[in-house]
Image (cartoon, rainbow, N blue to C red):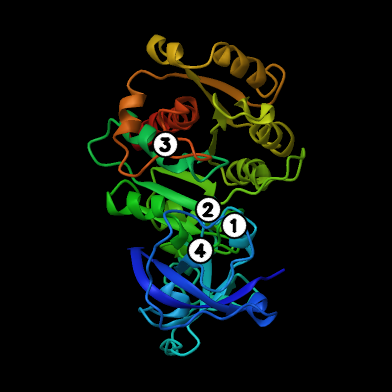
Amino acid sequence: MMIWREGVVRRLGRTWPGAAELEVEVTGGASVAAGEPAADAGAPVTSVPAGPVPAGPVPAGTLVRALAYPALVGEPAPGDRVLLSAAALARGLGTGGYAMVVALPDRLPADPAPGPGHLVKARYTPLQTLVLGADEQESEHHEILRDADDLAGLPVVVADLHSALPAVVAGVRAAWNGTTTPRVVYVMTDGGALPAWFSRSLAGLREAGALAGSVTVGQAFGGDLEAVSLHSGLLAARLVLGADVVVVAQGPGNLGTGTRWGFSGTVCGDAVNAVAALGGLAVASLRVSGADPRERHLGVSHHSLTAYGRVALAPADVVVPRFDDALAAALPEGLAARIDDQVAGLVAPVGIHRLVEVPTGGLLEALADSPVALSTMGRGLDADPAAFVAAAVAGVHAARVAGRRVR
């Protein structure tokens, strides 16, 4: 289902690697064709929306925030006519409040220069794109990956939400005791956003030097390296990017339906299986909340309990925070005990996984120093510290495992 709109770029907004934010005035679309008056394409903008446009039909004359990926559609400029995909915006869904730029119909980008790469991602959609996979025959990395089959004990942190990424990285860096900066590589699966360019967190972590690189796998694209599968992406993270620690998580835009199985985070269990198949060490990061009003996500989310308890068929290290006194006092009463009760079903002797307990001393300070903003489900560090600390302790444990490997 598509909701199409036409518009005119009125103003350029923020940019980060791979993405450009725009303010667009809607000038046409199906609703206009049905009888609404079209806006004057040359009319000046007299007001700018302070935030996401409320869910609704997005009529002509509405100013909307839009996002363009210049590698796909070209570089927008004020006055450009744009074709927008506005369905998620109209329905108030999780695209960050954006309409998405499909094309600049009056100024299409030039054809790219001939070059290697035949992997098609976002396949059979109007914006399918050709990329050069690290694992394909035309790649300079093909030979090292052709028969690769071993992660050699590499710690791989598996997380449900993209918002866990900066928290895991903060934990790795806080615990790292090597003489060099840890090489943390992000492997992005295709459960959320397909373009890695959508993530401001990823761009900010790269700019700050907190990430050594990224690999986009499956239908996801836009990483420093592309790979066909999660398995080859993990191997590329180790063998091409030299990872000390890998973090696997979907891009922004977790999908859930409030059912036992209908959520994109089930792939966390698949990721544990992939890591085990390749001889790595899977570190299960728990999705935790002390502030979510939904019972199914309070304490340890049912997403983690289902993915690690039902989908994962190989053992992982399940990392549980041991809250220090100061942090425990700031958390809802009974949260720590609830987490312990929920985790008991995942770890030995009941479940297949190994329990790892990590103290939280100093982690709030490390998280507060994150080079990118921390936000999960609209809540920051002050509103839901347990969410970020639970991700950070997984990074702490991964750093300790990596430290033993490099020594």
**Callout 4 secondary element:** loop
The residue that label 3 is drawn on is: 167
The part of the image, by quadrant, that contains residue 402 is top left
On the rendered structure, is 126 left or right of 261? left
The residue that label 2 is drawn on is: 251
**Observer-nearest of 9 and 264:** 9
Distance Cα–Cα, label 4 vs label 2: 8 Å
The residue that label 1 is drawn on is: 190
Residue at (27, 42) in percent of width and height: 181
**Callout 3 secondary element:** helix
Residue at (65, 42) in percent of width and height: 273
Above or below — where is 90 with respect to 126?
above
On the rendered structure, is 175 left or right of 306? left
> What's the residue type where badge 2 is placed?
Gly
Residue extending farthest to the right is 260
Q: Between disc 1 and disc 2, whose residue precedes?
A: 1
Determine which of the numbered discs, if any, sits on residue 195 in the image.
4
**Callout 2 secondary element:** loop
The percent coordinates of residue 68 (x first, y second) are 45, 70
Residue extending farthest to the left is 179
Distance Cα–Cα, label 4 vs label 1: 9 Å
